[in-house]
Image (tube, rainbow, N blue to C red):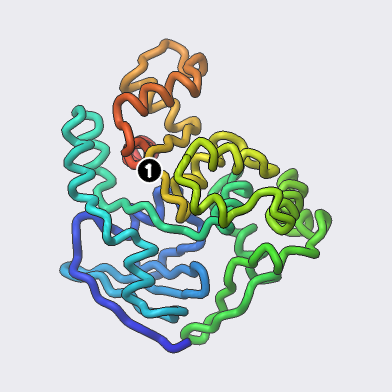
Amino acid sequence: MKEQKYKLKSIDSFRLKDIFECGQCFRWNQQEDESYTGIFGNNVLNIKQQKDEIIFQGICEEEIQQTVENYFDLNRDYEKIKEKLAKMDNHMKISVEHGKGIRILNQELWETIISFIISANNNIPRIKGIIERISKKYGNKIVYKGKEYHTFPTPEQLKNVTVEEYRKMGLGFRDVRLYQTTQMVLDKTVDLEKMKTNSNTQEVREELLKLAGVGPKVADCILLFSDLKRLEVFPIDVWVRRVMNDLYIKQDNENKVSKKQIETMAQEKFGDLAGLAQQYLFYWRREA
């Protein structure tokens, strides 16, 4: 694979920090020059944002423009989405303005599943460290500008990894879950390719929930942040529960607010853009 370069005119709906620090991905890291370098699929990219352009440079398996357009969801009109959400109320207007450069990435389904199983009861630096260790040991090596990067291993590459080997990588209670989920995907107990062609989001969610370590919140993160791209789902964690209660539900005790209550309100208020509304609200409240 040879190095490629692609330039894009800078747009309001594309800001590196907003995209890579909003909690949706774990393999992008900020460099000293404020660019970001990441690996996805068999691609290693560095992205630098200057005043009037965004520069993508790196090693891509296919043509770089097509790769970038697909991964960064560039054919979706985020300006139109932000305009619609901002009109809903002042809270949404403020949160959209705060995270105006967010784009939901089209991440590979298998990697997203494993990444969010690892994310359960975990912090970002630790999640990143575990994913890097797994990739370095079991993925393929790619050298870019003298530095080694490693692809996320396929189910086949993880086929013979034992629970004990996962444990040595610092996975804790997640070691058994990774092992079991890998075996379920390999033996087609859960068929990832069928998921991608099933337009019924609830059916896909139920399939995801069969996987070890995938509860409702992790399932919704997978649905939203992977190439399944179900923008209507509304992942709920402690931050989202807090912001939804503070702004809309207004219970004295936020712990008494049920997931069902939040989901119902999100669907009624945000409809098929619930997932994007969640990202703007989550990013704004966490950063603020």
Residue 226: percent from the left, percent from the top? 47, 53
Residue 136: percent from the left, percent from the top? 65, 71
Residue drawn at (45%, 45%), measured in percent from left and top?
A: 199
| Res 33 quadrant in image | bottom left
Between 103 and 109, the one lying in front of the other is: 109
On screen, residue 139 above or below 85: below
65 vs 88, left or right, is right
Element under disc 1: loop
Tell me which amino acid carries mark 1.
Leu
Residue drawn at (49%, 23%), measured in percent from left and top?
A: 259
Q: Is residue 6 visible?
A: yes
Query: Where does label 1 land, which residue?
Result: 231
Residue drawn at (49%, 30%), measured in percent from left and top?
A: 238
Crowding around mark 1 (Cα neighbors within 10 Å: few <14, some 14 to 19, many 20+) is some
Between 94 and 231, the one lying in front of the other is: 231
Residue drawn at (63%, 52%), measured in percent from left and top?
A: 191
On screen, residue 26 above or below 92: below
Residue 192: percent from the left, percent from the top? 59, 54
| Res 7 quadrant in image | bottom left
Residue 153: percent from the left, percent from the top? 64, 67
Q: Is residue 171 visible?
A: no
Q: Which residue lies furthest to the top in this view?
A: 252
Image mark count: 1
Q: In which quarter of the image is the C terminus?
A: top left
